[in-house]
Image (cartoon, grey):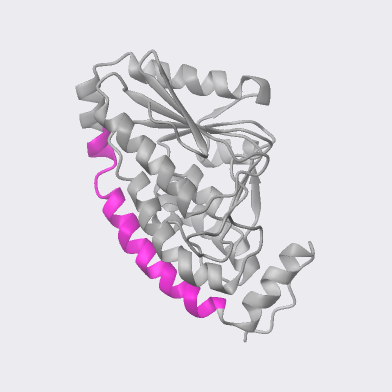
C-alpha cells in the first residue's frame, strides 16, 4: 500500500484500514481529503481488498475543517480565514465528492467529535460504529453559513428528511446514543472496542462474495456520488454569499467564544 503523509493504510484479511493521523482533532483540508480519496481509489483497484475501515487517531474522529490561508505552500492553521475559505473550499469539495464514488463498502469508526465538515466526512461510510461519547453536529447555522461537504443529500439519505432538517436548522449536537436511535450510527460500543467492532463488521461483509457485494452496494448507492457533486456546487454558492454577512462574522466569534450568537439578520 502507498505511504501517505497524513493517513496510514494497511491491508489484512481483505480489509483495508485507512487511519487519519492528525491527532487529537484531525482537522481536515484539501490535502487530507485528497489522500483519503487516493487511498480509497487504491483499495478499489486492489482485488485483495473487499472492505475499507475509515478511522482516526486521537480524541476526535474529525472536529471540522482547517482552511488556513488556502495557498499551496501553506501548512495550515486553525484560523477560519476569509482567504482560506475562498481559495480552498471549491477544490476541497471536488475531492470530497470523490469519496462518495468509491466502489467498495466503507465502515467508519467514530470517536469524539464529528462536527461540521467532520460530520460530512463521517457520512461517507456505508456504516458507522461509534462510542456513546461520540458527538455528531451540523453546526453551520451557528456559524451563520450553509452546510457543505454534500451533507444536504448524504444526511437525509441516512436518517430521513425530517431528522436531517432538525439537525441542520438547530445546529444541535447529537450523542452516540441519540445517533443510534436516529439510524445515524449502526453499532454503539465502548471506546476501547471501537476499532475492533468496526473491523468485525467489515470482516462480516468481506466474508461474502466480493462481486455480489460490489454489485449490491452500487445498486443501493446509485446516484449518490452524482447527487453530492450537484449538492456541493449549490452548497458552495450559498456558503460564499453567507460568508460575507455580519451574521457569519458573529457566528465565528460566538462559536470561538463558546457563547450564543447575537445575530441581526444582516
On the question of residue 160 being in view, the answer is no
Stretch in magenta: 217-243
Residue 16 part of the magenta-drawn span: no
Residue at position x 42%, y 74% in the image: 237
Q: Nearer the viewer, residue 67 or 126?
A: 67
Magenta run includes residue 232: yes
Q: Is residue 112 above or below residue 203?
A: below
Q: What secondary structure characterizes most of the magenta part?
A: helix
Q: Residue at x 20, y 23 (%)?
A: 211
Locate residue 149, reporting x and y percent.
Answer: 45, 56
- Quarter of the figure with the C terminus: bottom right
Q: Residue placed at 66% from the left, 58% from the top?
A: 78
The quadrant in which residue 41 appears is top left
| Residue pictured at 31% horizontal, 33% vertical | 42
Above or below, comparing residue 4 to residue 190 in the picture:
below
**Picture coordinates of residue 244, whole percent (x, y):** 56, 81
Work out whether residue 257 can be spotted: yes
Q: How many marks?
A: 0
Give the position of the N terminus as an image quadrant. Answer: top left
Viewer-nearest residue: 35 or 118: 35
Amino acid at each position: 500500500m502507498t505511504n501517505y503523509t497524513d493517513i496510514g493504510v494497511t491491508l489484512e484479511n481483505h480489509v483495508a484500514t485507512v487511519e487519519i493521523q492528525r491527532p487529537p482533532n484531525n482537522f481536515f483540508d484539501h490535502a487530507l481529503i485528497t489522500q483519503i480519496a487516493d487511498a480509497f481509489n487504491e483499495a478499489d483497484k486492489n482485488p485483495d481488498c473487499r472492505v475499507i475501515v475509515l478511522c482516526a487517531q486521537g480524541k476526535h474522529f474529525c472536529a471540522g475543517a482547517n482552511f488556513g490561508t488556502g495557498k499551496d505552500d501553506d501548512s495550515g492553521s486553525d484560523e477560519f480565514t476569509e482567504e482560506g475559505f475562498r481559495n480552498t473550499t471549491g477544490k476541497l469539495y471536488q475531492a470530497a465528492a470523490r469519496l462518495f464514488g468509491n466502489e467498495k463498502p466503507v465502515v467508519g469508526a467514530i470517536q469524539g467529535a464529528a462536527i461540521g465538515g467532520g460530520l460530512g466526512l463521517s457520512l461517507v461510510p456505508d456504516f458507522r460504529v461509534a462510542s456513546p461519547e461520540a458527538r455528531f453536529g451540523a453546526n453551520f447555522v451557528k456559524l451563520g453559513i450553509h452546510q457543505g461537504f454534500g451533507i444536504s443529500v448524504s444526511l437525509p439519505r441516512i436518517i430521513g428528511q425530517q431528522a436531517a432538517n432538525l439537525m441542520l436548522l438547530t445546529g444541535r449536537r447529537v450523542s452516540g446514543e441519540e445517533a443510534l436511535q436516529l439510524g445515524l450510527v449502526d453499532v454503539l460500543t465502548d471506546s476501547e472496542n471501537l476499532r475492533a467492532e468496526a473491523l468485525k463488521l467489515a470482516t462480516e461483509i468481506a466474508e461474502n462474495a466480493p462481486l455480489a457485494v460490489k454489485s449490491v452496494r452500487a445498486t443501493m448507492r446509485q446516484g449518490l456520488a452524482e447527487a453530492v457533486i450537484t449538492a456541493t456546487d449549490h452548497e458552495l454558492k450559498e456558503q460564499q454569499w453567507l460568508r460575507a454577512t455580519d451574521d457569519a462574522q458573529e457566528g465565528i466569534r460566538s462559536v470561538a467564544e463558546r457563547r450564543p450568537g447575537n445575530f441581526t439578520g444582516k
